[in-house]
């Protein structure tokens, strides 16, 4: 590692120790010979304290290892999973499992819920038409695995039936959507234009893409984490059969443990490592019922660094970006436990019109949300980061339809780098900014030339009153117009002339904002907007806002 970069990190960490003692916890080393204790998710810790008589626990391991645990502690195996199993235990058995030397961490099989388009607003219509010399791109050949409440395929709703290559129901049902959420998200991703004059304007972001329908949510819009995990692993196993390049997760649950222990996040990582881009909803926990803002409300598996986590924009019914705002309900970062900077970007999510599953729970509960058409050609309007995630999954299909060899990592970078930064909401509210799919596709066209380089520049920033020199060292440089993308072993991105993103331990944004990531865990946001673990403002989890 470059000596100056090490020195910069060292100085920031000294600042952390000097200025953040009120917020940092002293972690004492465990005495030699201390009894083993597996890490527990927050819900399991609560069950243990409450002495719950019946608990569903996700355990990793092979069939033989699971069987050995079940025999050793007289446990019931509720279901087998590719990555392990779900065990039914009592509080006493959970305590015994936690002390077993073969068990590293345990997670609850928690309830998963659906996270309750304007194609012009993100430039999708220009991609379809091949504006600026680009080929016409519709996402043809790319398949998106929709892990949701199913798709209504009894009727040929807006051509969705012709877009679905396969259906598998992990709840034991028939794959049909009786809740109405999955059908709506499916239409956002790959729906065809409506068949009547009053519905023809409604189309999915990638109308040429295909879908695989993986149902994990029941008729009430809820399901289990184990079903979602199994669906993700199914998509990985069958990615070559159907050319699954994207997984859409417009669902989630509270973050109850670090992402490295969360089995949902582990499944997301497996998918990305297998070459599948995962898009996840940020969640709809941006404010309390009384309107007060909430920080740190990102849901799982959107807290995974491997996922493209999407917040929701309100476009206010116009294609112009000038009046766009981040929806007040959209969850803000950073993530609980790990302080990962999320969301990654935002996309239209408020008042999105898409396919309606007539007779479903959402359709009958909110008849006033019906917008146009009827029967197989019906459309309704919904809002949420679920809808925004569907928009981004469609955008990923368009990008991959243009450059099929892109890895999940480079796909994510292309979307983030070309997003329009939202100064009013900042990194914790809007990530890198609002989705611009035409720019992302154009970016892939213009970054075909690679020039070797050894060093670019050095940026000096202030970290707690200390000047920090951040060297920019890399092996490759990609030039896109006036913007520069630096990509090499050190994972460094340079955006324009005044923004440097170091994809590792230090993030410098402009000349004021610095994120120091590692053992010191400091996030400095602007010159006075928001600070985590700093002497002026401390983020308190579960509270609605930072407190002094």
Image (spheres, rainbow, N blue to C red):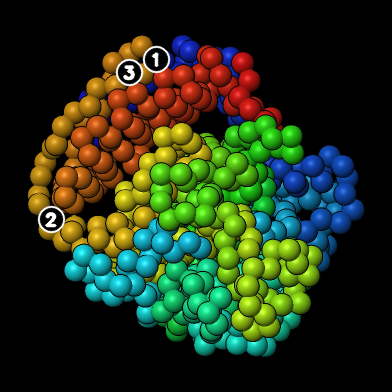
> Where's the C terminus, which quadrant?
top right
Residue drawn at point x = 78 percent, y = 50 percent: 94
For marks 2 and 3, give the CA distance: 32 Å
Q: Callout 1: 10 Å neighbours few (<14), some, many (20+)? A: some
Is residue 458 found left or right of 272 in the rendered image?
left
Residue at 19%, 28% in the rendered image = 458
- Mark closer to the chain start, 2 or 1: 2
Helix, strand or loop for disc 2? strand
Q: Which residue is labeled 1 in the image?
A: 464
- Reading the chain from its start, which is encountered first: label 2 or label 3? 2
Which sits in the foreground, 350 or 5? 350
The tag on residue 462 is: 3
Q: Which mark is residue 85?
A: none
Residue 403 versus residue 226: which sits nearer the camera? 403
Q: Is residue 27 left or right of residue 431?
A: right
Q: How many marks?
A: 3
Across and down, in percent, residue 262 comes to: 60, 51
Residue bearing mark 2: 450
The x and y percentages for residue 80 are: 68, 71
The crowd level at tag 3 (other Cα within 10 Å; few <14, some 14-19, many 20+) is some
Disc 3 to disc 1: CB gap under 8 Å: yes
Q: What secondary structure is marked by label 1?
A: loop
Q: Nearer the viewer, residue 276 or 297?
A: 297
| Residues at marks 3 and 1, CA–CA distance in whole angstroms | 6 Å
Residue 392 on image: x %, y %:
46, 60
Q: Is residue 306 above or below residue 67?
A: above
Q: Is residue 112 above or below residue 544?
A: below
């Amino acid at each position: 590692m470059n000596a100056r970069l090490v020195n910069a990190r060292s100085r920031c960490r000294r600042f952390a120790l000097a200025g953040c003692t009120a917020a940092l916890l002293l972690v004492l080393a465990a005495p030699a010979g201390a009894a083993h204790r597996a890490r527990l998710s927050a819900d399991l810790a609560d069950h243990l304290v409450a002495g719950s008589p019946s608990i569903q626990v996700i355990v990793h391991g092979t069939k033989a290892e699971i069987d050995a645990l079940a025999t050793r502690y007289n446990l019931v195996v509720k279901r087998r999973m590719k990555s392990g199993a779900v065990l039914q235990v009592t509080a006493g058995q959970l305590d015994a499992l936690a002390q077993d030397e073969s068990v590293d961490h345990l997670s609850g099989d928690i309830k998963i819920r659906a996270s309750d388009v304007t194609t012009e607003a993100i430039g999708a219509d220009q991609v379809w038409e091949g504006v600026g010399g680009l080929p016409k791109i519709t996402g043809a050949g790319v398949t998106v695995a929709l892990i949701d409440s199913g798709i209504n395929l009894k009727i040929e709703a807006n051509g969705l039936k012709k877009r679905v290559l396969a259906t598998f129901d992990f709840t034991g049902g028939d794959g049909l959507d009786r809740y109405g959420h999955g059908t709506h998200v499916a239409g956002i991703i790959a729906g065809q234009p409506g068949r009547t004059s009053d519905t023809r304007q409604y189309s999915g972001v990638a109308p040429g893409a295909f879908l695989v329908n993986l149902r994990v949510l029941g008729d009430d819009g809820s399901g289990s984490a184990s079903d979602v995990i199994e669906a993700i692993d199914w998509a990985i196993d069958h990615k070559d059969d159907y050319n699954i390049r994207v997984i859409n997760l417009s669902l989630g649950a509270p973050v109850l443990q670090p992402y490295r222990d969360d089995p949902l996040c582990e499944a997301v990582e497996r998918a990305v490592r297998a070459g599948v881009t995962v898009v996840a909803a940020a969640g709809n926990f941006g404010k309390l019922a009384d309107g007060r803002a909430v920080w740190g409300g990102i849901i799982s598996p959107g807290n995974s660094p491997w996922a493209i986590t999407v917040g929701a924009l309100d476009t206010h019914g116009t294609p112009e970006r000038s009046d766009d705002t981040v929806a007040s309900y959209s969850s803000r970062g950073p993530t609980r436990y790990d302080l990962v900077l999320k969301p990654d970007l935002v996309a239209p999510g408020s008042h999105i019109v898409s396919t309606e599953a007539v007779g479903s729970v959402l359709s009958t509960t909110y008849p006033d949300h019906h917008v146009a058409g009827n029967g197989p050609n019906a459309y309704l309007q919904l809002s949420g980061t679920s809808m925004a995630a569907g928009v981004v999954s469609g955008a990923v299909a368009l990008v991959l339809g243009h450059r099929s060899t892109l890895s999940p990592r480079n796909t994510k970078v292309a979307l983030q780098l070309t997003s329009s930064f939202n100064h009013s909401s900042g990194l914790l509210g809007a990530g890198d900014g609002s989705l611009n799919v035409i720019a992302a596709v154009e970016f892939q066209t213009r970054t075909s030339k690679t020039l070797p380089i050894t060093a670019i520049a050095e940026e000096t920033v202030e970290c707690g009153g200390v000047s920090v020199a951040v060297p920019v060292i890399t092996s490759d440089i990609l030039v896109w117009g006036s913007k520069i993308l630096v990509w090499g072993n050190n994972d460094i991105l340079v955006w324009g002339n005044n923004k440097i993103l170091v994809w590792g331990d230090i993030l410098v944004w402009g000349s004021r904002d610095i994120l120091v990531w590692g053992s010191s865990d400091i996030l400095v946001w602007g010159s006075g907007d928001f600070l985590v673990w700093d002497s002026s403002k401390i983020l308190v989890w579960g509270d609605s806002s930072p407190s002094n």
